[in-house]
Image (cartoon, rainbow, N blue to C red):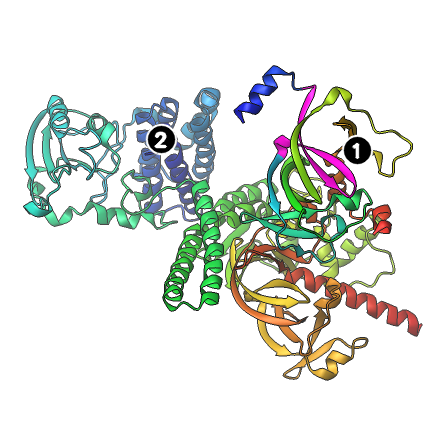
Amino acid sequence: MTQLALERNQAPAATVMRALTLELGDELFAIEATSVREIQDIVPVTEVPNAQAFVSGLINVRGRVVPLADLRVKFGMDRPPPDADTRIVVFEITLDEEPVIVGILADRVHTVTDIDLSEVEQPPNIGMRWRPEFVRGIAKHEGKFVIIPNLGPIFSGNVSQSKEPETEVLN
Amino acid sequence: MTQTDPAEIFRLEAQDVLEQLEQTLLDLGETLDDHDLIDSAFRALHTIKGSGAMFGFTEVASFVHEFETAFDRVRKGDAAPSNDLVSVSLDAKDHIALLIAEPAVHADAGGPILDRLRAIVGADASKIQPSEHEFVAADILPNNSIDTSEGWNVRFSLPEDGLSLGANPVLLLQELRDLGTCTVSASSKSIPNLEKLDPEICYLSWDVTLLGDCTQEAIEEVFMFVRDGMDLEIRPLPPKAEEVVDNIDYTPSEVVEEKVEPGNSKSDSQSGPSRGSSSLRVAAERLDELLDHVGELVIAQARLSQISYDSRDSSLMGVTEEIERLSAGLRDITMGIRMIPIGTLFNRFRRLVHDLSSDLGKNVEFATTGEQTELDKTVIESLADPLVHIIRNSIDHGLESPQDRVAAGKKEQGTVRLSAAHEGAEVAISVSDDGAGLNTDHIRRKAEEMGLISPDALMSENELHRMIFHPGFSTAQEITSVSGRGVGMDVVSRTMDALRGRIDVTSRPNIGTTVTLRLPLTLAIIDGMLVRVGSNRYSIPLSAVEECVELPAEVAENTSGRNFLSIRGELVPFLRLRELFGTKEPEELHQKVVIVSAGEQRMGLVVDQILGNTQTVIKSLSRLHADIETFAGATIMGDGAVALILDIVQLMRSAQKLENRLRDENKGQAA
């Protein structure tokens, strides 16, 4: 924590984002590290009947019942069953001004790294398979593209409207 | 040790006393010549004044002083109690509450109230000093700041930890001596024998006869810093003839014991600060924290049971059973602590009814039953708002005007009855009035106007009654200050959803309307029946379960047509949870039916297996699953996995919808 604070002092917070990088399908994603609470091995998942595929499960995180989301649904990716590299990333997001703890499946978790925000580019309007509001930006990190997902719209779309036709089709 | 602001203690206590005062005044409004009530009101005022002055609330003290004086006059028969007096006193009570909250802001607003008081009681009330002759038994309130006496008898003993906390009896006695001539005698009665004697504990108690013209407040000031936990008794010296006081009278702690009875407005006791031994004020958050921990304990214990059962180690199983018993006990006690009688809530509405009936010019009798019914404190708190709306509605829309009532051949005085009772694992709270009843034609017209129902929709009377809970629905012709905006009933309905409760409305023309709120007893930990559907496990609240039967083979095969089961000659509809949940795993050969009930309705739930009973700690689902209605929450089971808790009422609703749809489809085919 103090180390993080120190680094923040050295470099203005606006230019660098400390992020956790993880793999979903073939893509690399980055999630702001400060919101991450823990990374878990895969645990038994309780299926919620009639819930959407995006948040179809519940898990037990230290005695707390936490919804388990699968971002791959929102990004229209294949969803192979969990393997030895699969992890659950538990983090906190704010929905309608209330903090909510959620878990997401990650095919593989890489590392915590600093992403230079000055090199982040807006998602292109053309040539992207994903809904633009789900992507905050695309960064280049160690020669690879890293997607920074826009978690707010991804999750809050679920609170108000219950159906997402295009992802439904992809399933 | 927690640091408490003395002024905060005063605020809390004053709140209790004010509530008690309000009840007393409202009682007095009904029976004007009840002397006990006048005495009680006087004592409450007296307490507020005394302790207000003590804690530096001078505005409160001086305002209350005149009221106290007025009630003293009434008490002595110098002035007659009247409804005007009650009404001005109620206003004064509100003003006192404001004064206590923000003394500086509201200090000037008291003048008009006092003017009204003077006009009612006559004479300049402030000139008459209250006297202090009427003290009840031994539980004298240590707060009559004005009252003086020839002398005082002070008895005190320090709490066990008094010395270690820095109290010094020698200094206390010295300070008392400064107030007047003292005769001090120490009692060594409670000193134990040498082996048991703890040198850090003060076993002595003192009896001081103080001769001199000083106030009780002055004596209390001496003990100000050691007051917590100590026994202190200050009484004016009795007249010579009664000077010998039998020791048996001195059982202060027993006297205090009686004080905690809620609603016991006839005793002046609740105001006494010396309640230490019998009841304890605990911050609500601490209780919530305790409950959280008990919840975690119950979950951990379930895991332990599972592990010990798998291990087959008999000594481990022994200990586990012991822990199981203890945690169940702890759970019950914790839940018990959170239960408070609903009477505390009911009392608040008396004022509401009183004010409403005078505002609307309706003569309303307010009756309550079942005040002793206990409910979880969070439930009681969240019920306050809905009940206010229902009661307002009953008085404003339900009850007719006195003229109309007489014309309809009814008593001029309308009745609103508030009652609470346990019904199985539910609590039913109902508000009934003897008014005109709901006008179903009117409701229907309005609902059609608002486009809520189509003009040709077939609706049962009950369904029409339920329309009043629709947001924005109001049949009132005009919006009054009391109701008519169509917001209130919507609040009721949403609160009940949040509490997992339900609302029943029954209404008969010209006889009256009853709105009943049914709530689960507790919101935190329940007993549940664990069942399996496919590979998932679900918990059914045990309180809803009536019985379990096997699904007869011939019914199981017939998956299309009738979904009814004959239970001892009665037809019970059933719902296949596999279908509802879209379970893909192959079904069990012998499926079971769990018969559940909610209110008067019964329904069967077809499951693959019944796994047994568990303690279920309810965890609410996150907002991400807010759209899923069939589950009341989730719980964590012994093996650490999550199980969903079925919401029986919602399941019944969805079963009914399904049934209606099927019926409509059949009708459509027939036509």
Q: Is residue B64 above or below residue B20?
A: above
Q: Is residue B222 above or below residue B456?
A: above
The disc placed on residue A135 is 1
Q: Which of the chains bears the disc numbered 2? A: B
- Residue B584 seen in the figure: yes
In which quadrant of the rendered view does residue B486 lie? top right
C-alpha distance separating marks 1 and 2: 51 Å
In which quadrant of the rendered view does residue B604 lie? bottom right
* Numbered range of the magenta stretch: A14-35
Q: Could you tell me the amino acid type at mark 1?
A: Val
Name the spot of residue A11 as percent of width and height, x first. 64, 16
Q: Could you tell me the amino acid type at mark 2?
A: Thr
Q: Is residue B643 left or right of residue B314?
A: right
Q: Is residue B657 above or below residue B88?
A: below
- Point out the image quarter for the C terminus of chain B: bottom right
Q: Which residue is mark 2?
A: B4
Q: Is residue B43 left or right of residue B31?
A: left
Name the spot of residue B413 as percent of width and height, x first. 56, 53
Q: Is residue B226 above or below residue B415?
A: above
- Point out the image quarter for the N terminus of chain B: top left
Q: Secondary structure at mark 1?
A: strand
Name the spot of residue B332 as percent of width and height, x first. 42, 58
